[in-house]
Amino acid sequence: MELYGLLLVISTFLLATYIFHEISNTVFIKKKNLPPGPFGLPLIGSLITIRHRTHQSLAKLAKTYGPLMTIKLGFINVVVASSAEMAKEILQKHDVEFVGRSIPDAVTAEKGYELALPWLPTGPQWRKLRKIFNSHIFMEQKLDSLRHLRHDVVKTMVERVVEAQECGKAMYIGGIVFSTVMKLLSKMLFSADMLDPASDAMKELQVLNTNIMELVAKPNLVDYFPFLRPFDPQGIRRKIRVSYNRWHELIDDMIDQRMKRRRATSERSGDVLDVLLDYTEHEGPDGLTRLDVKLLIAEIFIAGTDTSITTVEWVMAELLHNPTILSKTKQELSEIITPGGIVQEQDIARLPYLTAVIKETMRMHQTSPLLLPHQAEQDVEIQGYTIPKHTQIWVNSWSISRDATYWEKPTCFMPERFLDVDIDFRGNDFRFTPFSAGRRICPGMNLALRIVPLIVVNLVKTFDWKLPNGMAPEDMDMTEKYGATLHKAEPLVAIPVRITT
């Protein structure tokens, strides 16, 4: 009887909550002139409609309801922008009003998440952290001074691929790119390798990253029915906490080692960790806590590796899927780059076709199909509609980058569209925002624009690549796996063949 009584209480509570919500929502919608959108089912709204490949489902709905639509997801109203014009309204014209963040419940499992740069409100602490990123970590002059590190790391990557080629091994492209980017970031941040690239521990880190990115993006009932937050019904917060805690343990170890060395000697490495620890010695508004340092480092590793891996894997997949385009890329390399050694960063500016291939990949396979969710800080009027304070705002950049209004044959992979044209991807052309735009633009953009081309050009120049088991290019699985970043559903596996000329 006790169980039945409990179920009755819970059912009554849910029903009462639902009735109250529906009445409130009806009054709210009548009072506020929201953009149009599907009404959805009682209680759950349109959750079933968009549960798989959310970005694609929203793109289909936008064809019916327009480029600015309201979609009801459980108890939450979300306004979705699906055109370049609407993206500009949100990310540029009303940037200040929409600068807030809607924080996924999964993220709250990380200790101190509310102090992490992606989720901080744009107040003094946010501005301080952005300044540190822009002045000491991702400033162009600083990155240029570390060019030799990137060359050394890529040389090591090529040597590892050569070893696999000599053994006739097929390689997971994502795996070799992950260890390469991890090695590079470790040298930038710590002046040392965090882990052996071929070790089991490195594989563990890749699993940790994958878990975090997948669980953050996994549809979570708590995000749509906030009263469920204490129960964590899908266990998402519990599962992701394990990965966050492990990352923090590793970073704590690196900080402890450095602090011990700093106490023993006045010498400084001048790397990112030393710069951040210097800030911990400041008092007042300019200082950082140890937790601030950990969160910054974790953000660089987790977000920086995943987006770079995803982009490189898609570039290589598209090249293998389109042999004619691969041939043109190799032809450009043979005409411009001297044989022998690795291609260096400064050479990439002389490779317009390769650059166009990478841009076309970023258009076709946006790493973040729905830009990190914004939130209205106040009521905002757009195109005659009212978007109320606290409303979540999603920009469907995937839909925009495949819209025939802006792109000829948008579903075709055509690098030529980026030749001899100035299509900006640094947040000024809202047809193409792989790094977002406005004051929330990705702070790691300058680093990504160096890492990705350097890895790709050396994989393409140094090796031919065969698909395993005699697979033909046209038989490749090019479908996407929806998540915080758009991974390839079937990880790319290829066999390197050394070019001897």
Image: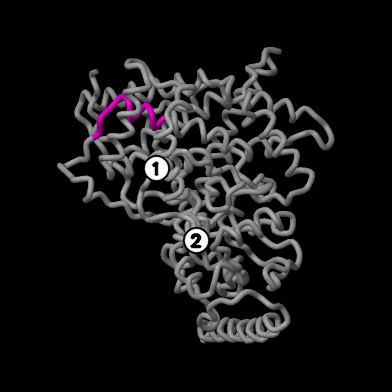
Which labelled disc corresponds to residue 416? 1
Mark 2, secondary structure of its residue: loop
406 or 400, which lies in front? 406
- Name the residue that disc number 2 marks: 235
Is residue 355 one of those drawn in magenta? Answer: no
Vertically, is 446 above or below 159?
A: below
Is residue 458 one of those drawn in magenta? Answer: yes
Please, what is the three-letter code of the amino acid marked with disc 2?
Answer: Gly
Q: Give the residues in magenta.
A: 455-465
Q: Give the image location of residue 399, x and y in percent.
A: 48, 60
Q: Quadrant of residue 139?
A: top right
Which color scheme did the rendering employ for the protein?
one colour
Q: Give the image location of residue 393, x and y in percent.
A: 62, 63
Query: Residue lying farthest front?
Result: 420
From the viewer's perspective, is 490 left or right of 18?
Answer: left
Report if residue 202 is visible in the image. no
Seen at 73% across and 66% down, the residue is: 380
